[in-house]
Amino acid sequence: MLGWEFPPFISGGLGTACYGLTKAMDQLGMKVTFVLPKMVESKYATHVKLLTPNSHMSESSFVTHELKNVKFHTLDSTLQPYSTPETYQRQIEEILRQKRLLFGNNSILSSKSLSSSDYSHDMYTEVHRYAAMAAELAMYEEFDIVHAHDWMTYPAGIAVAALSRKPLVIHVHSTEFDRSGEHVNQMIYDIERLGMERADKIIAVSHFTRNIVISRYGISGDKVEVVYNGVERNGNWTNLSDTGIKKEEQIVLFLGRITMQKGPEYFLLAAKKVLEVMSNVKFVMAGSGDLIHKSIEMAAQLGIGHKVLFTGFLRGEDVQKIYKMADLYVMPSVSEPFGIAPLEALDHDVPVIISKQSGVSEVLMHALKVDFWDVNEIANKIIAVLKYPPLQMTLRSHGNFEVRKLRWIDSATKCAKIYEETLAPAGV
Amino acid sequence: MSSICFYFQVHQPSRLRHYTVFDSNWDYFDEHKNASICRKVANKCYLPTNRLLLETINRFDGKFRIAYSITGTLLEQFERYSPEVLSTFDALAHTGCVEFLAETYYHSLSFLYSRNEFAEQIQKHIDAIKYYFGQTPRVFRNTELIYNNDLAAYIESMGCFDAIITEGADHILGYRSPNFVYKPLGCDKLKLLLKNYSLSDDIAFRFSNRDWAQWPLTADKFANWINNVNGNGTVVNLFMDYETFGEHQWEDTGIFNFMRHLPEEILRHPDNNFKTPSEVVKAYDTIGTIDVPHIISWADTERDLSAWLGNAMQSNAIHELYRLEHRIKQTGDERLISDWRKLQTSDHFYYMCTKYFSDGDVHKYFNPYDSPYESYINFMNVLDNVQRRCADTGNITEKKSQEINKTKSDGGNSCSEPQQFPGLLKEKIAGNLKIIESKNKNLTDLQATDKTV
């Protein structure tokens, strides 16, 4: 399995999905070797119990106690989910700067670190360098099938599959069209398309995404299967100590990356409309992203700055706390392949409003659904939920029950079935 | 002796338009949608079925008899959107073989929430039936056949009804058969007619179901089942939605042909006949008392109120609605009262039902909303505006409130003289009648050629 995020290295839904799926596969007794890039400069590196790279391949491997059938390999790479070529460039410069500070210019180590064999100066080269490393690693590993998650690992998937002559399954959690709208990056699109073409089977996280794969990438429909994500139930969240916040105002939550894809401006426009009608409500935007500054400015321009709180990126217990405080979760995504966050919200007894342009709207019946651009309707529904407790109550109880039916174990079982189907023709 | 008693429920609600919290005008109802559905169903069901039944009645020279309950909300829609339907019903009324029943004008659940409002709506419906069809109903059916002992007692106390209709639910009958006339517990004169749900549903629900062992259902097969009742009962009450014909069961299922041939198949047996509810009441004595302490209805397998009042949203919406009654009526504002009453139509609460929602079944088919939540939000937004209008009209004059008190004491819960109905329809109907008669003639001719072939 080629991924690029795993808890606690999480910046979005992909890591959650990889974790949920891998854990469920582990429970099913499937043997998984999980390979992922490891950011050297990651500021969260201290929280992570990863072994330091010590072999000549810059590889580290470990087995967690929790997941008995899963072996992890991290490859030193600066690849990060959700980055763009521009941010990658900035990162690389930052790393190099830090290394110079750390080791001094004359150090042998530093000169080695600076060599282009370790990190590439542009993202595409890095993606391919990563592919080469993964392929090298694959020579020492036993496996039957290659499963690659999202575009950065497609080249690695192609390389490993070609080298090992094993079938390739790619898992589409998002496409360039979701992330960038119509302003697609041609290089990324090409990588995605190549991956889809070379794959023996494609797993899309929703019919919404499957349609994009078919219509935008020209892939034949019989190759594309839909496997919905599940949700990791957190049994212990109710034991959380009190947040210590006394609530006099109702809280409407936006939780996700603050990027174009997630539709933060629609959240703010709806907030403005809501505040025209009712006042005892606060809007919380939890997350970070390239539109965060723009969003803060926009809130100020709309004159609702005092009613909108930006928390920055939240993880772990903070996420649980914010859910506990929230009365309503809104996901106005412009294009959301799946959207695990609303399921987590429901799991925490928070009713949700989700955009119809999302995969999760295919699986949730007990949620309010809106078109992301229909700010009036978003506001209309936010007000209704805040104003009518019976609505909140019914959504909450039915929604929470519904979420329990979405289990990772079912997703993993479906993946296993797809593996079998993919492997079967080879065996004949 | 076995009498077949057909009664058809004819109803469409006034559907609400999409109404957000930011809307403030008083146009709550979706004119366009209501008009197009009314016309669509008129063309698929009401008009062809009316013509067919009219033709059948004429053909059997008074031996084929039926009954209708048409709600006030639909009568209003007919008048606005497809008056030709009204004239065909009027033609049916003129045959003398068709009885019209009384119910709440707005197809409401008012019995459960306000006896005053309940009585007023029944009166309004009686007046409407008199106005349109020249009959005074003597048999009452409550919305969705909702029923209990209290309802029967209340209807008897109104003094203007001979019988009441409800579902022949297994749990109220026990070992007994629905094919007799009963007496409601606590009533002296009022009789109770019970729907034979098994035979009714064979037509209404199972007719086109190919997985059903009895498919295809033919007129002679059904007549045989009816004949089997002979000796075990006096009356078979076949109660169903009128939309069964052509709308729930499409024309290509053969439902019209079934209905065309059913009367002759049934009448082939010398002991069988057709009777309207009032005729059944006159012809047969009660054979026992039925006790219904808890409320029943004809809905779903539960036969209870859960389709309308099963979740928190539904009960909240309906409580808020009836809480306004006093204030609404105090305003004396006709339009406001009428808007408020149209909101009472049971369909609005049915749309909010979360039961089976995930499974996407029959509830969904009749639901103009994507989800029960949408319908609740929409309803509450409208209700909020109604409430605001109430507050705006606010202080009513002393005179008006006196007037209201006066009508209240006059009205009580007994049936009174009809009100004058607005509208110019009578003349229209007279004009249309001729057209219909000629159409019927054509139909009869067609029928005749059918037979020769």
Image (cartoon, coloured by chain):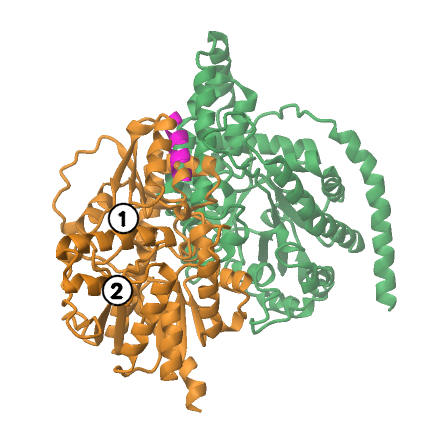
Q: Count neighbours of disc 2 (C-alpha within 10 A) and say few if under 14, some if 14 to 19, many if 20 or more.
A: few
Give me the chain letter of mark 1.
A
Type of secondary structure dominating the magenta stretch: helix
> Which residues are drawn in magenta?
A266-277
From the viewer's perspective, tell me whether residue B348 is left or right of residue A7: right
Q: Position of residue A196 (x, y in %)?
A: 46, 69
Distance between the alpha carbons at the discs numbered 2 and 1? 51 Å
Q: Position of residue A96 (x, y in %)?
A: 23, 55
Asked if B50 appears above or below A154 in the picture, the reply is above
Pointer 1 residue: A349
Q: Is residue A248 visible?
A: yes
Disc 2 secondary structure class: loop
Please tell me the numbered disc located at residue A115. 2
- What kind of residue is marked 2? Ser
Disc 1 secondary structure class: loop
From the viewer's perspective, tell me whether residue A325 is left or right of residue B283: left
- What kind of residue is marked 1? Asp
Q: Which chain is green?
A: B
Q: Residue furthest bottom?
A: A428
